[in-house]
Image (cartoon, helix red, strand yellow):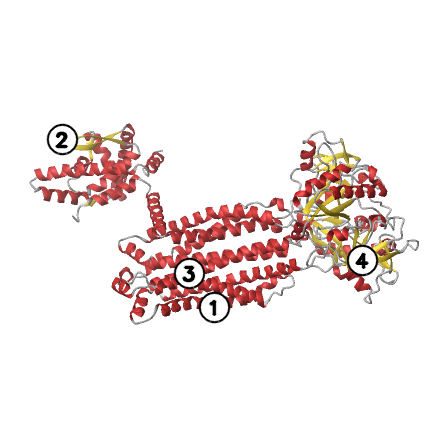
Amino acid sequence: MKTLRSMALRFAGLFRKERREQEFADEIESHLQMQVDDNVRAGMTPVEARRTALLKLGGIEQTKQAYRERGTVPFLETLRQDLHFAFRQFRKNPGFALTAIIILALGIGASTAIFSAVNPVIFRSLPYPNADRVMKLWEMRRGDLPMYVTYATYHGMRERSRSFEWLAVVKAWQPAMIGTREPERLEGERVSFDYFRVLSVEPALGRNFERADDRHKGPNVVILSDGLWRRRFGADPGIVGRQITLDDNLYTVLGVMPRSFENVVGGSAELWAPLQYDDSLPSDGREFGHHLQMIGRLRPHVSTHDAGNESRVMMQTLGQMYAKGYDSSGGAPKGMLVYPLQKDITRDVRPVLYAILGGVALVLLIACVNVTNLLLARGAQRRAEFAMRAAVGAGRARLLQQLVTESLLLALAGGAIGMLLAEAGVRILLALSPAELPRKELIHLDPAVFLFALMMTTLVGIFVGIIPAFYAWHTDPHTALQENSRTTSSSQQLTRRTLVVAEVAIALVLLVSAGLQLRSIRRLFAMPAGFDSSHLLTMQVQEYGKRFDDNKVRARFYERALGAVREVPGVEAAAFTSQLPLSGDSETNSLYFEACPNDKALGAYRYGVSPDYFTTMHIPLLRGRLLTENDRAEMPGAVVISESLANRLFPAGNALGQRVRMGPDIDRPDRPWQAIVGIVGDVKQESLATDDPAAFYTTPTQWAWVDPVQSLVVRTQGDPAPMATAIRRAIWSVDKDEPIVRVATLQNLVIASEAERRFALVLFEAFALAGLVLAATGIYGVLSGSVTERTREIGVRAALGASPANILSLFVGQGMKLTVVGAVIGILGALATSRALLTLLFSVSATDPVTYAGVTLLLAAVAAVACWIPARRAARVDPAITLRAE
Amino acid sequence: MADKKDVWQGTLALMVLKTLQTLGPLHGYGIARRIEQISGDMLSLNYGTLYPALLKLEQEGSITSEWGVSENNRKAKFYRLTRAGRKQLEQEAREWEQTTSILARFLSPGEEQA
């Protein structure tokens, strides 16, 4: 109790100090007066009396100090003093404090933002029980590459596998839902009954799928996600057992998944229905189509390796058992590939993210080096100050405490601003991030990462910050005070120069990385896409309702919709296509040319297009004719193929008029032959970077079916974006129930198709800029310090006849020497590391001389400016003033 | 000076409390003089060291202080024992007596043979 009470009073003593000090001064004064009275009475002179009284007291200041220490908490009291002093120091030298804080904030902010974004994507384990046992399985095609799995493979493996506890297959499903609002197309999945069992997640409401739900022609049942249940059904607790309408069919709701359920396979799916394929595996059915994704849960203590081996052996057995079925879709797979799901979903983005992690690590490193350098320079300037403090009796602990306080203050300020930067950075990253980035919704500012970055920079700050204190202890205060306060030891100079060289080298590596990517993306967007993307608007239209089950009705709807769109003012041309270039669509189908009987399963992109598609997209006709309104179902089949397909098969240039069979049932001899009527320019389908333009085009009615989902492309006279509303209204004027999605300008689609590269590029540009600025700051700092220290020498030189130009070149030369050494090391470093960027590069080699030369020049130019500013100061030194000043 | 004893901090507090109990409210100078007199000038007391001790006792609630006028008409701060201070004095005095008597027995010659 007693201690508590006195502690409280002592903390209280930290406040209202002036009054208390005054009161104690009064008390001491009255004490002295009383003794002086006594002494005078004892016969001393007043002067002697006061002197004796003071002696007896032991000194006024000492007494006050002892009283003060008892009156407050000494540690906090000195901390208060230190903070006060530190603030004064920073105010006196705001340049130093600001630079240090900005560097710290940049380092902490950038690394926190990046690690926050990358951590959940790459490192956080999947949100399922024993997630490490969940595998992704692929069939293996030629070249040991993965491809989608057939239902037959799933069915066979499910019955035979000992390695897997559960296996499941899943495919995308996009049912439409109409209601009081605009028709909506939902993202869903058709899954085998054991899908949620592989993931070990049960519905929160209702029940899971049972085997009986997943039989051929089974009941229409559906499980909803928590999000859809809340959004469309108001979180109705009685939803289970109710019927909802999807695609004009009634579905019974079986259950609702828990809110925490994260659907890693097929991300945005909001509802699931059973697959309901035919377990009798008809050899000409979809059961042998490679279009399913397969996942599996390993039994405990089974390794990925063993599961892979078992699956390969099983695949061989199945290949023999169902030879006929597999042959209908290009032959039995060569084997199976088994990967942990975690690895599988991040496979495409991992190289990019690792490159970005490497980049931000370099930025953090350069920030640490820079802060070190800054504090070293500052410490050197303050050596005399600390020698002085030591000389007048400041103890080691006291000096340390003050320096640590200053460093911590800087770190805290840097951390606070860094936190804001990180918060903004995470938002920017999310806005920029490519759509394929998995588990994006988990990305948020990670406090653990923030603390880590804060600690890193703070530790560096404290460690470097206390160096002046060591100098103060180890040098005799006498010599330190005598020594010119502005000179630094040569070993320290060397350290600082080495650090600057390191900064320049790291900055160059970052610049090379950014430069290579910049050139890649320039080349990429300079690649001809094969069509003119300006003034093109696109949207995807899906038919809805049983009345469209008839191909003819469906075709008529699209024709009428096209007519309505053409009526909209400002529309120049419009067409429908079954798939749109550079939009993520990817459908290939088989071709069989009469002239090439051995090449039966030739694959090419298949487009079902309305005749105006080529003129709308500005795809050039090279030979023959385009498709016309006359190419209807009852007319002889007409096919247009791409230039590269024509050249590949018919190098002699005789492609026109060749006869071809297309699509499913290619083998059936009763299938009619169709004729090649025209050859058009190549169009990039998947990506500007890939060379994949083998393609063929037919009218919708001359293909085996009329596609239920088609993309409208509209060429407009003016800016296409504002016309979207009018065009949508035109389509709904034909039928108001048709969902319309993916409304975008073609130009934006093309840019989005390279989102991953752009994402990495933007980040590396930011890193490189940060590196460049930091390196320039470093050069400037060292040179500026050097000019200050050598003012006297400069004065002597000037007095002896050196012209300002001589002195300017002396200092610029000194700075540029460091730059050159750093640049050479940086180039070597970049040559060694830029191969890590290979996946991000396009038609630019990792050792591209133009990039290396360009960024080196840029760096040299910036360094020259950083040298020139302090050098100019040196050149302006007036010898008369400096020499007198000593 | 060499034969004068420095005041040991713990005992200083006890002396202050005892002084205040005997003499009633008193200012710092008076307390210092009193301690010196009672000790028969055997103690060397820097008067200044008295004040942190007084502050500590006040923080712990054993004494309180208020400004008043001294016998020579000087303004001075007077310290007074509180109820808690009186209890503390009794207890510490008892403990001190015990300690000294134990030590005395230890140090007196011939005791251990008995």
Which residue is tagged 4?
A641
Q: Secondary structure at mark 4?
A: strand
Which residue is tagged 3?
A780
What is the chain letter for disc 1? A
- Disc 1 to disc 3, C-alpha distance: 16 Å
Which residue is tagged 2?
B73
- Disc 4 to disc 1, C-alpha distance: 57 Å
Question: Are callouts 2 and 3 both on one chain?
Answer: no
In the rendering, at what x and y percent does residue A354 appear? 60, 56
The tag on residue A821 is 1
Query: Which one is in front in this view, the residue at disc 2 or the one at disc 3?
Result: 3
- Disc 4 to disc 3, C-alpha distance: 62 Å
- Disc 4 to disc 2, C-alpha distance: 119 Å
What is the chain letter for disc 3? A
Residue type at mark 2?
Answer: Asn
Residue type at mark 3?
Answer: Tyr
Residue type at mark 1?
Answer: Val
Left or right of residue A354: residue B25: left
